[in-house]
Amino acid sequence: MSLITLTTDFGTKDHFVGAVKGAIYSELPDAKIVDITHHITPFNITETAYILKNTYKSFPDKTIHIIGVDSELSVENKHIAVELDNHYFICPDNGLISMITSDINPTKIVEINIHNHIETSFPVLDVFVYVASHIARGGSLNIIGKEINSYKNSVEIQPKINKHKNVIIGGIIYIDNYGNVITNINKKLFKSVGKGRNFIITAKRYNFTKIYKRYNEIVDYSISKEKRNYDGEKLAIFNSSGFLEIAIYRSNLNTVGGASTLLGLGYRDTITIEFEAIPSAKFTAKN
């Protein structure tokens, strides 16, 4: 039984998602379809990569991932099918795959070339579903495209380190359903640069000098419930995906608000971490 995931910026108001699912079931009546999300910010490749990077490994090997973000065919935005890490990805060649994983080499990449037989303005429905169905039936990638050696590379989500290795300069790559802002600074980089030093995280005019392990670590449970008032408190945390996140405790976009709105933080805004300087070594001259 085929397992196919859908990740798009279509939303759920229009007919697009339903049409894609219907086309899959028409080709593969026994398919299982999983919606990863249809609420990607339109054409946002960085956001798409963040979600898929933290999702696809939870699925079994040979899962087929259809990605309908920035998917209109052009001479600069071709369509590819990639076998990577025992998964299949059907998507535009716009740098997305390199942002999902940069440390795993693909088993095979093909540039999809069935467009000569299919005239469409909705490639996810007419092309990507066809390719997914072909793969699900055990078909070879070489049948639907010509093999190529590489795909477009994008390094947009890479943070920078200053030459003194005292500052990490990152940016916001995603805003979640709670309004929490996720940066491109991961825990591994933080530890390798910081080496246990004290630090200040700066997000616009807000500073943080502590990173929590859990959201509720901010709560002092020795205080009686009726005297606690932590809702709306800002905090920094490494989230479940290992990325630095600026959050509002128990945020609710309809009442308290989230970090994005309350702190005025948006996509691509700069986040910096400044570590205390390492004292210069002192040498004693020998006579």
Image (cartoon, rainbow, N blue to C red):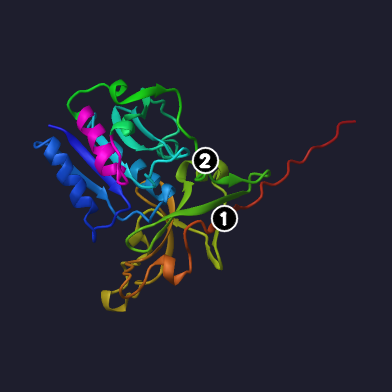
Front residue of 179 and 70: 70
Quadrant housing residue 231: bottom left
Q: Bounds of the magenta span?
A: 118-135
Label 2 to label 1: alpha-carbon separation: 18 Å
Residue 152 position within the rendered picture, expressed as x and y whole percent measured from the top left: 48, 34
Quadrant housing residue 221: bottom left
Q: Residue at x 28, y 22 (%)?
A: 143
Q: Residues within 10 Å of mark 2 (few under 14, many from 20)?
A: few
Q: What is the secondary structure assignment of the residue under circle 2?
A: loop
Q: Residue flagged by tag 1: what amino acid is it? A: Thr
Looking at the image, is 48 positioned above or below residue 260? above
Q: Residue flagged by tag 2: what amino acid is it? A: Val
Name the magenta segment's main secondary structure: helix
Numbered circles on residues, count: 2
Residue at the limit of the structure toward the bottom, as seen here: 226
Q: What is the secondary structure assignment of the residue under circle 1?
A: strand
Question: Is 180 situated left or right of 19 in this image?
Answer: right
Q: Residue at x 43, y 63 (%)?
A: 235
Front residue of 98 and 226: 98
Which residue carries the number 2 mark?
155
Q: Residue at x 54, y 51 (%)?
A: 170
Residue at the limit of the structure toward the right, as seen here: 287
Question: Is 228 situated left or right of 21 in this image?
Answer: right
Does residue 58 show up? no
268 in the magenta segment: no
126 in the magenta segment: yes
In front: mark 2 or mark 1?
2
Closer to the chain start, of discs 2 and 1, is 2
Label annotation for residue 272 = 1
